[in-house]
Amino acid sequence: MTKTVNTTPYTDQKPGTSGLRKKVPVFQQPNYAENFIQSIFDSLEGFAGKTLVIGGDGRFYNREVIQIAIKMAAANGFGRVLVGRGGILSTPAASHVIRKYEAFGGIVLSASHNPGGPAEDFGIKYNIGNGGPAPEKVTDAIYAHTKTIERYKIADVADVNLDAEGEQEVAGMTVQVINPVSDYAELMETLFDFTAIRAHLAGGFRIVFDAMSAVTGPYAKEILENRLGAAKGSVLNFVPLPDFGGHHPDPNLVHARALYEEMMGENAPDFGAASDGDGDRNLIIGKGIFVTPSDSLAMLAANATLAPGYAKGLAGIARSMPTSGAADRVAEKLGIGIYETPTGWKFFGNLLDAGLATICGEESAGTGSSHVREKDGLWAVLLWLNILAVRKESVVDIAREHWTTYGRNYYSRHDYEEVDSAAANGLMDALREQLTTLPGRKLGDLTIETADDFSYHDPVDHSVSNNQGIRILFEGGSRVVFRLSGTGTSGATLRVYIERFEPDATKHDVDTQVALADLIEAADALAGIKERTGRTEPTVIT
Ligand code: G6P
Ligand code: ZN
């Protein structure tokens, strides 16, 4: 029933920021997915007879790879596989299921916010027993195995029926098809005051949630409409589609434009939100106000004790380095720890496991907490709703009050997508070479205070991660950060993160791009963005 298949290595199976992501036709090459999955198993020890969680965001090729992964798990000696019905599990739900059922680990199939379809993106990620993405030492081992693999093991059996909940047997292993939503919805009920949110919604507070034809549809329908009583029709695009309806399932101001426009319109609902392909990102828009992910992290942290799950207070806050310093000011006021990590949710795992941080966030629209080990889009929406239900104020009022208390960190990210890799690397190298000469240099009214290439020293396992992004800090707390994306699948994506701290509440009404204009100019002067990339403007501004 189990067979061993000879194979040869592919040279391009290095996991990026978030697992292995490639175009679907790359994954469709003979043995491509099998090689990577076998390399995952070959990097692990002690899983015989244990449980593996498998699920994905429903994108094109999801079902095929789920069948492969189940059959390979059986042949490699796992005792049980838990798989979401229809092959569906949002990334945060997968993390929760791994933790709740004390699984050995999980395989999450997704390319997050990247488009799906026969010519679009697919991805495979391994999560460890704490429910979080595998740390670098595991992904390095997986990569090493992909370079020498000679054979893989797979059960020679018929496909599993993924659409009927219950247990089946595959080559001596039990496969349990589970309801993808119920465990997660139950967890949310333990964290948030559903009664207060329900009452607030019943009192006329109007919400809209755009599931972007991606995985959060069934979760949002069940939680927001069925359990919390939001008006029917509050959840848009709730059927997960293999190609996300031809859109980018990325909840930002470009790809969730219609939602943004609705929220800025005259008859806007009170609260708007969206999530991405696999359900871990969030977009928060109040009536007439977009809340940047960096601000959202700070505001959620400042108000978290209003939710029952966080009533005892936070141990600490963690943010990725390019995320604005707004959360730092909250941590300072609360007298709790603040941790600055490299980009990538996996870096929060140790801090959460060690109880050093309770809430974490990234500028890339990811926020989450110790309840799972992934970022969690609906969690952020529910925490906002809980805070709004208790404070009974508008999002605008909460944001304004926050800025008045803590000062405002004007913040924007400019992305230059699919630029020539050599040009992008050249730009970063040239910046690196200048680093030591930059302090003291003046650009208009700006004076550079320090400049470095960010290195992270993990306070828990003491590992060191170098070259995590170039930081140029100006006197007064403004900052420009340059980094190359680790999640793109073609060419290079240059990200430029721009931030200005403004303590004066009378200056909190300026348009963000205007407030940052001199820093944007300084970024180009320092890095030669236009000249080196040949681009006159960013592809995406968030
Ligand atoms: C994924 C990761 C995040 C990360 C984001 C941006 O969503 O889960 O942790 O912040 O990618 O990564 P990038 O390397 O493209 O900036
Ligand atoms: Zn995602």
Image (cartoon, rainbow, N blue to C red):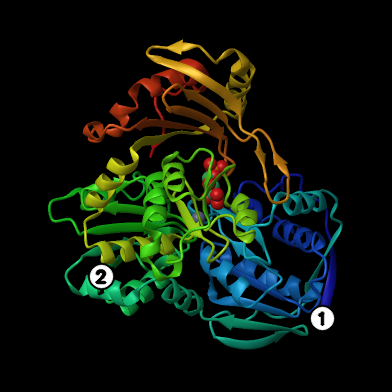
The amino acid beneath tag 2 is Gly
State the residue at coordinates (59%, 62%).
109
Res 214 → quadrant:
bottom left
State the residue at coordinates (76%, 58%).
35
The image shows residue 54 at horizontal and vertical percentages of: 63, 70
The amino acid beneath tag 1 is Met
Measured Cα–Cα span from mark 2 to mark 1: 48 Å
Numbered label attached to residue 233:
2
Q: Which of the image's four quarters has the N terminus?
A: bottom right
| Mark 1: secondary structure | loop
Numbered label attached to residue 1:
1
State the residue at coordinates (47%, 41%).
323
The image shows residue 443 at horizontal and vertical percentages of: 43, 13
| Mark 2: secondary structure | loop
State the residue at coordinates (58%, 32%).
469
* Residue 413 appears in the rendering: yes
Q: Which of 312 and 533 is in front in this view?
A: 312
Vertical comparison of 162 with 10: above or below? below
- How many numbered markers are drawn? 2
Tell me the crowding category of disc 1: few under 14, some 14 to 19, or many 20 or more residues within 10 angstroms, Cα based.
few
